[in-house]
């Protein structure tokens, strides 16, 4: 199913941050499709994933990708009525913590050992600190604590048998 594909973007949306939006080695996944012009101020914008699936239930086997990119919805809302939620989706106000936690665990599951997970987050509804508590893993790099920048990029590496927590090495099963 992912033959020759090294990269998985689990919430691709309109692929806004991609330089090449049609890489041959990448699978673009999202839980929705939207036609060209679905946003009133961007007539050429559309959402057309290679595979229609939810980031909480990624349909690939364990250890399938060298790089996983996760840019989930950042806004907690009841509906998709504003431009931002139409473009990027929104999190359910009642289940968002479980959804983000489950989605991160799924992205981690399909990441191969020594693979990299890039996670993007905007603090429009949830602060960075709370997000990292939900994820439960310490990033290798990212914006420093107290950063005034509202959008954060985090880099994680799936190192088998070692989990870094607060600067202390702890043996784990790597999952």
Image (tube, helix red, strand yellow):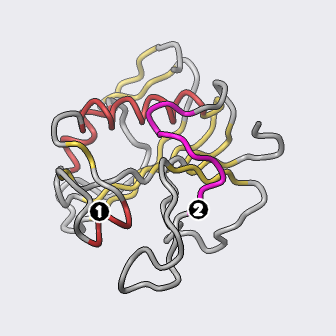
Q: Position of residue 63 (x, y in %)?
A: 66, 28
146 left or right of 49 in image: left
Is residue 151 within the magenta segment? no
Q: Position of residue 73 (x, y in %)?
A: 33, 53
Please tell me which of labels 1 and 2 falls first in the chain. 2
**Looking at the image, residue 125 lies above or below residue 23:** above
Q: Which residues are magenta?
A: 48-58
Residue occupying image coordinates x 48% and y 39%: 54
Q: Nearer the viewer, residue 135 or 89?
A: 89
Residue under label 1: 85
User: Which numbered dot is residue 67?
Assistant: none
On the image, the x and y values in percent for residue 76 come to: 19, 51
Q: Quadrant of residue 138?
A: top left
Residue at horizontal 82 percent and vertical 40 percent from the top: 3
Q: Is residue 137 above or below residue 15?
A: above
Mark 1 → mark 2, Cα distance in angstroms: 16 Å
Q: Residue at x 55, y 27 (%)?
A: 109
Pointer 1 local density, CA inside 10 Å: few below 14, some 14–19, many at least 20: some
Left or right, 25 with respect to 90, comes to: right
| Disc 2 element | loop
Quarter of the rendering occupied by the N terminus = top right
Spot the residue most to the right.
Answer: 4
Vertical position of residue 17 compared to residue 37: above or below: above
């Amino acid at each position: 199913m992912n033959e020759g594909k090294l990269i998985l973007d689990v919430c691709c949306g309109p692929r806004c941050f991609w330089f090449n939006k049609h890489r041959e080695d990448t699978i673009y996944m999202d839980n929705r499709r939207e036609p060209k012009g679905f946003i009133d101020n961007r007539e050429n914008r559309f959402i057309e994933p290679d595979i229609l699936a939810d980031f909480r239930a990624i349909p690939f086997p364990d250890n399938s990708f060298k790089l996983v990119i996760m840019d989930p919805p950042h806004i907690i809302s009841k509906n998709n009525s504003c431009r931002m939620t139409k473009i990027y989706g929104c999190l359910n106000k009642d289940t968002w913590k479980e959804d983000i936690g489950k989605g991160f665990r799924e992205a981690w599951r399909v990441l191969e050992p020594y693979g990299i997970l890039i996670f993007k987050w905007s603090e429009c509804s949830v602060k960075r600190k709370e997000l990292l508590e939900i994820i439960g893993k310490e990033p290798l790099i990212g914006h420093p604590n107290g950063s005034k920048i509202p959008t954060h990029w985090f880099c994680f590496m799936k190192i088998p048998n070692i989990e870094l927590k607060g600067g202390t090495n702890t043996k784990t099963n790597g999952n």
